[in-house]
Amino acid sequence: EYDVILAPSEFTALLSQTVCDMASGRTLVEGTSIYANKENQRVMNEKISLTSGLNTEGNAFFAIDQEGFFAPAATIIDHGVFKQHYFDSYYAALAGKKTTGNCRRVAGNYENWFAAPPTVHLNNFEINAGTTSLDKLIAETKHGILVERTGWPLADPVSGSFSCEVRSGFLIE
């Protein structure tokens, strides 16, 4: 067993496949969201907050989603407390809710962007920054791995377990 320190890019990839997926209107409608009926309940460590659409400088910021709806900033998790699911118009209608302006086309590159079907997706999500420096995290780790890059991270959105190939990592002893 190892303690693991994940680079922000790798943590983001795993988070989007787990927490972000479970907070979508799609998983709520399909009955697979672990956050169903959990509004205003603690679902994770109080140090974690997740917001959508606050960073207007980010590369995935949209003031209007790809269905033409206003995409206001929204708090999904606030200090570990689940606040709300996010919706495009399709899943909002199925859930009896209003869209939150979270419809995007997701493609591997811009050439295929308009060929991709629209789907419910977070808008430039952010996680609140911690206060501990990387140097201090490493110094406090007795036996662990610093993972800077993975290949094909796969995560189970229900259990939160994941597997991936470490492409760039360092043993900490």
Image (spheres, rainbow, N blue to C red):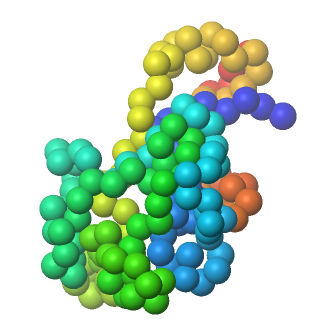
Q: Name the residue rendered at 47%, 75% in the picture.
A: 25
Image x and y of residue 29, in percent: 55, 82
- In this rendering, would 22 be left or right of 105? right
Q: Which of 54 and 119 is in front in this view?
A: 54
Q: Nearer the viewer, residue 100 or 156?
A: 100
Whether 45 is drawn above or below 114: the answer is above
Residue 67 in the figure: left or right of residue 145: left
The residue sitting at the right extreme is 1
Location of residue 87 with respect to 48 vertically, above or below: below
Question: Which residue is found at the position 69% from the left and 17% from the top?
Answer: 141
Please provide percent x and percent y for residue 36.
Answer: 62, 68
Quadrant of the rendering where the C terminus is positioned:
top right
Q: In this view, does 50 lie to the left or right of 47?
A: left
Comparing 150 with 115, the one in front is 115
Residue 131: in sight, yes or no?
yes
Does residue 128 sit above or below 35 in this rendering?
above
Would you say residue 119 is visible in this rendering?
A: no
Quadrant where the N terminus is found in the figure:
top right
Quadrant in which residue 88 is drawn: bottom left
Residue 162 to residue 95: above or below: above
- Specify the quadrant of the image occupied by residue 119: bottom left
Residue under the image location 63 percent in, 45 percent down: 42
Quarter of the image where one finds residue 152: bottom right
Q: Nearer the viewer, residue 46 or 117?
A: 46
Image location of residue 92, percent across then percent down: 40, 81
**Where residue 106 sits: x, y (%)?**
34, 73
Please state the total of marks drawn on the protein image: 0
